[in-house]
Amino acid sequence: MGRAPCCDKANVKKGPWSPEEDAKLKDYIEKYGTGGNWIALPQKIGIKRCGKSCRLRWLNYLRPNIKHGGFSEEEDNIICSLYISIGSRWSIIAAQLPGRTDNDIKNYWNTRLKKKLLGRRKQSHASRLSGSNQEPKDGSGMETLSNSAILNPVQEKMMQNLQLLNESSNPLLMQHVLPSSPQKIELCGPSTNRHQQLYSISNDMLVNQMNNSMNGINIPSSSPHIPESDGTKLPSMEFQQYLAFQAEIDEFLSNKGANSISLDQTQANEIECFKDMDGAKDMMTWWSNEFDANSASSNSWDSNGVVDHQQREIKY
DNA sequence: AAAGGCGGCAACCGCAATCAT
DNA sequence: AATGATTGCGGTTGCCGCCTT
Protein backbone atom coordinates (compact mmCIF):
# COMPACT_ATOMS: atom_id res chain seq x y z
CA MET A 1 0.00 0.00 0.00
CA GLY A 2 1.47 3.30 -1.11
CA ARG A 3 1.30 6.60 0.69
CA ALA A 4 -1.78 8.78 0.41
CA PRO A 5 -1.69 11.27 -2.48
CA CYS A 6 -1.06 14.87 -1.50
CA CYS A 7 -4.15 15.99 -3.38
CA ASP A 8 -7.21 14.71 -5.19
CA LYS A 9 -5.62 13.83 -8.51
CA ALA A 10 -8.95 13.46 -10.25
CA ASN A 11 -9.78 17.12 -9.65
CA VAL A 12 -6.35 18.51 -10.32
CA LYS A 13 -5.25 20.04 -13.57
CA LYS A 14 -1.93 18.91 -15.02
CA GLY A 15 0.28 20.12 -17.79
CA PRO A 16 1.41 23.60 -18.78
CA TRP A 17 0.24 26.56 -16.75
CA SER A 18 -2.02 29.15 -18.34
CA PRO A 19 -1.29 32.88 -18.01
CA GLU A 20 -4.43 33.19 -15.89
CA GLU A 21 -3.21 30.57 -13.43
CA ASP A 22 0.19 32.21 -13.30
CA ALA A 23 -1.35 35.60 -12.60
CA LYS A 24 -3.57 34.25 -9.82
CA LEU A 25 -0.72 32.45 -8.12
CA LYS A 26 1.69 35.35 -8.47
CA ASP A 27 -0.76 37.95 -7.26
CA TYR A 28 -1.78 35.93 -4.26
CA ILE A 29 1.74 35.10 -3.10
CA GLU A 30 2.92 38.67 -3.59
CA LYS A 31 0.05 39.91 -1.47
CA TYR A 32 -0.28 37.25 1.19
CA GLY A 33 2.72 34.94 0.90
CA THR A 34 2.35 31.19 0.83
CA GLY A 35 0.84 31.07 4.28
CA GLY A 36 3.28 28.33 5.11
CA ASN A 37 1.09 25.74 3.46
CA TRP A 38 1.41 24.97 -0.21
CA ILE A 39 -1.16 22.20 -0.09
CA ALA A 40 -3.91 24.58 0.97
CA LEU A 41 -2.83 27.36 -1.37
CA PRO A 42 -4.57 26.31 -4.61
CA GLN A 43 -7.95 26.17 -2.87
CA LYS A 44 -7.47 29.64 -1.41
CA ILE A 45 -6.54 31.01 -4.80
CA GLY A 46 -9.19 29.11 -6.66
CA ILE A 47 -7.08 27.15 -9.09
CA LYS A 48 -7.29 23.42 -9.67
CA ARG A 49 -3.65 22.59 -9.15
CA CYS A 50 -1.73 20.42 -6.75
CA GLY A 51 0.09 22.34 -4.02
CA LYS A 52 3.36 20.85 -5.09
CA SER A 53 2.73 22.03 -8.60
CA CYS A 54 2.09 25.57 -7.33
CA ARG A 55 5.27 25.53 -5.32
CA LEU A 56 7.28 24.35 -8.33
CA ARG A 57 5.71 26.94 -10.60
CA TRP A 58 6.45 29.73 -8.16
CA LEU A 59 10.02 28.66 -7.44
CA ASN A 60 10.99 27.93 -11.01
CA TYR A 61 9.11 30.62 -12.85
CA LEU A 62 7.06 33.20 -11.04
CA ARG A 63 9.20 34.39 -8.17
CA PRO A 64 11.14 37.61 -8.75
CA ASN A 65 14.64 37.80 -10.21
CA ILE A 66 14.56 34.45 -11.97
CA LYS A 67 17.00 34.13 -14.85
CA HIS A 68 16.45 31.75 -17.74
CA GLY A 69 19.07 30.61 -20.23
CA GLY A 70 22.17 32.58 -21.15
CA PHE A 71 24.52 30.86 -18.76
CA SER A 72 27.82 32.69 -18.46
CA GLU A 73 31.27 31.12 -18.54
CA GLU A 74 31.56 31.84 -14.86
CA GLU A 75 28.36 29.96 -14.20
CA ASP A 76 29.49 27.08 -16.42
CA ASN A 77 32.67 26.77 -14.43
CA ILE A 78 30.88 26.90 -11.12
CA ILE A 79 28.40 24.25 -12.21
CA CYS A 80 31.13 21.97 -13.54
CA SER A 81 33.37 22.27 -10.57
CA LEU A 82 30.57 21.89 -8.07
CA TYR A 83 29.17 18.93 -9.94
CA ILE A 84 32.56 17.31 -9.85
CA SER A 85 32.94 18.05 -6.19
CA ILE A 86 29.47 17.39 -4.76
CA GLY A 87 27.60 15.61 -7.54
CA SER A 88 24.03 16.24 -8.58
CA ARG A 89 23.07 18.34 -5.59
CA TRP A 90 21.25 20.77 -7.83
CA SER A 91 19.67 22.75 -5.05
CA ILE A 92 23.06 23.41 -3.49
CA ILE A 93 24.55 24.36 -6.81
CA ALA A 94 21.59 26.61 -7.56
CA ALA A 95 21.99 28.31 -4.20
CA GLN A 96 25.37 29.56 -5.36
CA LEU A 97 24.04 30.98 -8.62
CA PRO A 98 21.70 33.89 -7.91
CA GLY A 99 18.57 33.81 -10.01
CA ARG A 100 19.09 30.24 -11.14
CA THR A 101 16.84 27.39 -10.17
CA ASP A 102 17.83 23.83 -9.51
CA ASN A 103 15.59 22.66 -12.33
CA ASP A 104 17.21 25.06 -14.77
CA ILE A 105 20.70 24.01 -13.82
CA LYS A 106 19.78 20.35 -13.95
CA ASN A 107 18.35 20.77 -17.45
CA TYR A 108 21.32 22.81 -18.57
CA TRP A 109 23.75 20.20 -17.30
CA ASN A 110 21.85 17.27 -18.80
CA THR A 111 21.29 18.83 -22.20
CA ARG A 112 24.44 20.84 -22.78
CA LEU A 113 27.28 20.91 -20.29
CA LYS A 114 27.56 17.15 -19.98
CA LYS A 115 27.70 16.71 -23.73
CA LYS A 116 30.30 19.42 -24.09
CA LEU A 117 32.42 17.72 -21.52
CA LEU A 118 31.99 14.36 -23.17
CA GLY A 119 32.70 15.86 -26.59
CA ARG A 120 36.00 17.16 -25.41
CA ARG A 121 36.79 13.89 -23.76
CA LYS A 122 36.08 11.95 -26.95
CA GLN A 123 38.10 14.41 -29.00
CA SER A 124 41.12 14.14 -26.77
CA HIS A 125 40.84 10.38 -26.65
CA ALA A 126 40.76 10.15 -30.42
CA SER A 127 43.77 12.39 -30.80
CA ARG A 128 45.69 10.31 -28.31
CA LEU A 129 44.87 7.13 -30.19
CA SER A 130 46.12 8.70 -33.40
CA GLY A 131 49.35 9.63 -31.69
CA SER A 132 48.93 13.31 -32.41
CA ASN A 133 49.15 14.22 -28.78
CA GLN A 134 52.56 13.02 -27.78
CA GLU A 135 53.73 13.72 -24.29
CA PRO A 136 56.62 16.13 -24.16
CA LYS A 137 59.73 14.58 -22.82
CA ASP A 138 62.95 15.91 -21.50
CA GLY A 139 66.38 14.58 -22.29
CA SER A 140 66.06 11.64 -19.94
CA GLY A 141 62.79 10.59 -21.46
CA MET A 142 61.00 11.69 -18.31
CA GLU A 143 58.71 14.60 -17.76
CA THR A 144 58.64 16.39 -14.49
CA LEU A 145 55.19 17.30 -13.34
CA SER A 146 54.57 20.34 -11.29
CA ASN A 147 52.59 20.34 -8.10
CA SER A 148 49.52 21.02 -10.13
CA ALA A 149 49.51 17.40 -11.17
CA ILE A 150 48.08 16.65 -7.77
CA LEU A 151 46.03 19.78 -7.20
CA ASN A 152 45.27 20.77 -10.75
CA PRO A 153 43.35 23.82 -12.02
CA VAL A 154 40.01 22.06 -11.82
CA GLN A 155 40.64 21.11 -8.27
CA GLU A 156 42.01 24.53 -7.48
CA LYS A 157 38.86 26.05 -8.91
CA MET A 158 36.80 23.63 -6.93
CA MET A 159 38.61 24.62 -3.78
CA GLN A 160 38.19 28.30 -4.56
CA ASN A 161 34.49 27.80 -5.01
CA LEU A 162 34.22 25.80 -1.85
CA GLN A 163 36.12 28.44 0.03
CA LEU A 164 33.78 31.10 -1.28
CA LEU A 165 30.80 29.01 -0.31
CA ASN A 166 32.39 28.39 3.01
CA GLU A 167 32.90 32.06 3.60
CA SER A 168 29.25 32.65 2.88
CA SER A 169 28.50 30.36 5.82
CA ASN A 170 25.52 29.03 3.95
CA PRO A 171 23.93 26.67 6.46
CA LEU A 172 22.41 24.53 3.76
CA LEU A 173 25.76 24.06 2.13
CA MET A 174 27.40 23.34 5.43
CA GLN A 175 24.79 20.76 6.14
CA HIS A 176 25.39 18.94 2.88
CA VAL A 177 29.09 19.34 2.35
CA LEU A 178 30.49 19.17 5.82
CA PRO A 179 30.11 15.84 7.54
CA SER A 180 28.60 16.31 10.95
CA SER A 181 30.29 13.54 12.85
CA PRO A 182 33.24 14.74 14.94
CA GLN A 183 35.05 11.50 14.34
CA LYS A 184 34.81 12.08 10.61
CA ILE A 185 36.29 15.50 11.01
CA GLU A 186 39.00 14.01 13.12
CA LEU A 187 40.09 11.95 10.14
CA CYS A 188 41.22 15.11 8.47
CA GLY A 189 43.16 16.24 11.45
CA PRO A 190 42.32 18.64 14.23
CA SER A 191 40.97 21.98 13.13
CA THR A 192 40.17 24.94 15.24
CA ASN A 193 37.00 26.08 13.58
CA ARG A 194 34.32 24.99 11.19
CA HIS A 195 35.79 26.82 8.25
CA GLN A 196 39.13 25.17 8.67
CA GLN A 197 37.43 21.84 9.02
CA LEU A 198 35.55 22.31 5.80
CA TYR A 199 38.64 23.37 3.95
CA SER A 200 40.59 20.53 5.42
CA ILE A 201 38.00 18.04 4.29
CA SER A 202 37.65 19.71 0.93
CA ASN A 203 41.30 19.78 0.23
CA ASP A 204 41.94 16.17 0.99
CA MET A 205 38.74 14.25 0.65
CA LEU A 206 37.16 16.08 -2.25
CA VAL A 207 40.28 15.66 -4.31
CA ASN A 208 40.06 11.96 -3.70
CA GLN A 209 36.35 12.02 -4.38
CA MET A 210 36.94 13.80 -7.64
CA ASN A 211 39.62 11.35 -8.55
CA ASN A 212 37.14 8.56 -8.08
CA SER A 213 34.64 10.25 -10.34
CA MET A 214 36.90 9.95 -13.35
CA ASN A 215 34.69 7.69 -15.37
CA GLY A 216 36.37 4.59 -16.69
CA ILE A 217 39.61 5.37 -15.01
CA ASN A 218 40.78 3.11 -12.24
CA ILE A 219 41.94 5.25 -9.43
CA PRO A 220 45.18 4.10 -7.88
CA SER A 221 44.41 2.11 -4.80
CA SER A 222 47.23 3.38 -2.67
CA SER A 223 50.33 5.07 -3.98
CA PRO A 224 50.31 6.14 -7.63
CA HIS A 225 54.05 5.91 -7.67
CA ILE A 226 56.19 3.00 -8.68
CA PRO A 227 59.64 3.32 -7.08
CA GLU A 228 62.52 2.76 -9.49
CA SER A 229 65.89 1.33 -8.62
CA ASP A 230 67.50 4.77 -8.82
CA GLY A 231 65.07 6.17 -6.28
CA THR A 232 62.82 8.07 -8.72
CA LYS A 233 59.10 7.44 -8.63
CA LEU A 234 57.15 6.63 -11.77
CA PRO A 235 53.39 7.00 -12.00
CA SER A 236 51.53 3.76 -12.58
CA MET A 237 49.68 3.19 -15.86
CA GLU A 238 46.32 3.73 -14.25
CA PHE A 239 47.57 6.92 -12.67
CA GLN A 240 48.75 8.12 -16.06
CA GLN A 241 45.29 7.40 -17.46
CA TYR A 242 43.77 9.33 -14.63
CA LEU A 243 46.06 12.29 -15.20
CA ALA A 244 45.19 12.29 -18.88
CA PHE A 245 41.49 12.50 -18.19
CA GLN A 246 42.00 15.19 -15.63
CA ALA A 247 43.89 17.15 -18.24
CA GLU A 248 40.92 16.89 -20.57
CA ILE A 249 38.61 18.32 -17.99
CA ASP A 250 41.14 21.05 -17.27
CA GLU A 251 41.24 21.89 -20.93
CA PHE A 252 37.49 21.94 -21.17
CA LEU A 253 37.10 24.24 -18.23
CA SER A 254 39.85 26.57 -19.30
CA ASN A 255 38.59 26.81 -22.88
CA LYS A 256 34.95 26.61 -21.85
CA GLY A 257 33.83 24.66 -24.85
CA ALA A 258 35.37 27.03 -27.36
CA ASN A 259 36.50 24.01 -29.30
CA SER A 260 33.57 21.83 -28.41
CA ILE A 261 32.47 19.42 -31.06
CA SER A 262 29.05 18.17 -31.92
CA LEU A 263 28.28 14.55 -31.32
CA ASP A 264 27.77 12.06 -34.10
CA GLN A 265 25.60 9.02 -33.57
CA THR A 266 28.48 6.89 -32.36
CA GLN A 267 29.40 9.48 -29.83
CA ALA A 268 25.80 9.87 -28.83
CA ASN A 269 25.64 6.16 -28.19
CA GLU A 270 28.77 6.35 -26.17
CA ILE A 271 27.15 8.95 -24.01
CA GLU A 272 25.82 5.92 -22.25
CA CYS A 273 29.24 5.34 -20.85
CA PHE A 274 29.11 8.79 -19.38
CA LYS A 275 26.07 7.95 -17.36
CA ASP A 276 28.36 6.79 -14.64
CA MET A 277 29.35 10.37 -14.29
CA ASP A 278 25.80 10.94 -13.23
CA GLY A 279 26.52 8.46 -10.55
CA ALA A 280 27.22 11.17 -8.12
CA LYS A 281 25.51 8.87 -5.70
CA ASP A 282 28.37 6.48 -6.21
CA MET A 283 30.79 9.27 -5.57
CA MET A 284 28.95 10.30 -2.47
CA THR A 285 28.64 6.72 -1.35
CA TRP A 286 32.31 6.29 -1.74
CA TRP A 287 32.88 9.49 0.11
CA SER A 288 30.66 8.61 3.02
CA ASN A 289 32.04 5.10 3.17
CA GLU A 290 35.41 6.67 3.32
CA PHE A 291 34.41 8.56 6.41
CA ASP A 292 32.32 5.84 7.89
CA ALA A 293 35.20 3.45 7.74
CA ASN A 294 36.64 5.47 10.60
CA SER A 295 40.03 4.23 9.62
CA ALA A 296 42.87 4.99 7.29
CA SER A 297 41.77 5.37 3.70
CA SER A 298 42.50 2.60 1.28
CA ASN A 299 41.38 4.70 -1.67
CA SER A 300 43.34 7.76 -0.80
CA TRP A 301 46.74 8.24 -2.18
CA ASP A 302 48.01 8.54 1.32
CA SER A 303 47.39 6.19 4.15
CA ASN A 304 45.92 8.90 6.34
CA GLY A 305 43.74 10.38 3.65
CA VAL A 306 45.86 13.50 3.37
CA VAL A 307 47.84 14.28 0.27
CA ASP A 308 51.50 14.36 1.09
CA HIS A 309 52.65 17.62 -0.36
CA GLN A 310 56.23 16.47 -0.17
CA GLN A 311 55.51 13.81 -2.76
CA ARG A 312 54.02 16.05 -5.37
CA GLU A 313 56.90 15.97 -7.77
CA ILE A 314 56.47 13.02 -10.03
CA LYS A 315 58.63 11.90 -12.89
CA TYR A 316 57.64 10.03 -15.99
C1' DA B 1 6.04 20.53 -48.35
C1' DA B 2 5.61 16.69 -45.31
C1' DA B 3 7.24 13.42 -42.04
C1' DG B 4 10.24 11.74 -38.75
C1' DG B 5 13.99 12.52 -35.53
C1' DC B 6 16.00 15.02 -32.04
C1' DG B 7 16.99 18.39 -28.40
C1' DG B 8 15.47 21.51 -24.92
C1' DC B 9 12.73 22.40 -21.25
C1' DA B 10 8.61 22.59 -18.19
C1' DA B 11 6.29 19.79 -15.30
C1' DC B 12 5.33 15.50 -12.91
C1' DC B 13 6.45 11.63 -9.82
C1' DG B 14 8.04 9.34 -5.94
C1' DC B 15 11.09 9.15 -2.17
C1' DA B 16 13.26 11.01 1.90
C1' DA B 17 13.63 14.50 5.28
C1' DT B 18 11.43 17.53 8.25
C1' DC B 19 7.72 19.33 10.88
C1' DA B 20 3.56 19.19 13.69
C1' DT B 21 0.61 16.93 16.72
C1' DA C 1 8.15 8.15 20.68
C1' DA C 2 4.98 7.46 17.02
C1' DT C 3 2.38 8.86 13.27
C1' DG C 4 0.63 11.61 9.64
C1' DA C 5 1.19 15.84 6.88
C1' DT C 6 4.03 18.74 4.33
C1' DT C 7 8.10 20.17 2.02
C1' DG C 8 12.25 19.60 -0.67
C1' DC C 9 14.76 17.28 -3.90
C1' DG C 10 16.46 14.65 -7.88
C1' DG C 11 15.16 11.64 -11.62
C1' DT C 12 12.15 11.08 -15.34
C1' DT C 13 8.61 12.04 -18.68
C1' DG C 14 6.30 14.11 -22.35
C1' DC C 15 5.34 18.09 -25.13
C1' DC C 16 6.83 21.36 -28.48
C1' DG C 17 9.56 23.42 -31.86
C1' DC C 18 13.46 23.09 -34.85
C1' DC C 19 16.18 20.48 -38.07
C1' DT C 20 17.09 17.05 -41.42
C1' DT C 21 15.82 14.06 -45.03
Image: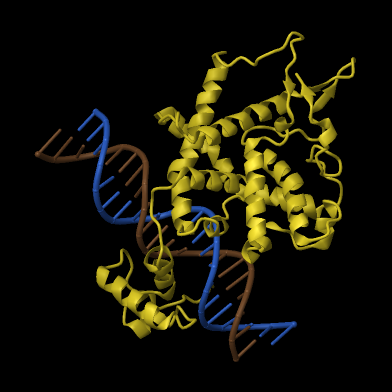
Chain colours: A yellow, B brown, C blue
Q: Is residue A188 above or below residue A24?
A: above
Instruction: Classify residue A175 by image quadrant.
Output: bottom right
Left or right for A178, reference A132: right
Q: Quadrant of the C terminus of chain A?
A: top right
Left or right for B10, reference A280: left
Q: Position of residue A71 (x, y in %)?
A: 43, 47
Q: How many marks?
A: 0
Q: Nearer the viewer, residue B17 or A254?
A: A254
Q: Quadrant of the N terminus of chain A?
A: bottom right
Q: Nearer the viewer, residue A192 or A103?
A: A192
The residue positioned 43% from the left and 83% from the top of the image is A40
Left or right for A81, reference A40: right
Q: Position of residue A279 (x, y in %)?
A: 60, 46
- The reply to whether residue A15 is in sight is yes
Instruction: Classify residue A276 by image quadrant.
Output: top right
Left or right for A292, reference C10: right
The residue positioned 59% from the left and 44% from the top of the image is A81
Q: Position of residue A124 (x, y in %)?
A: 54, 24
The residue positioned 37% from the left and 67% from the top of the image is A62
Q: Is residue A15 above or below residue A187?
A: below
The residue positioned 71% from the left and 42% from the top of the image is A207
Q: Position of residue A195 (x, y in %)?
A: 74, 58
- The reply to whether residue A2 is in sight is no
- Extreme residue in the top direction: A139
Q: Is residue A268 above or below residue A41?
A: above
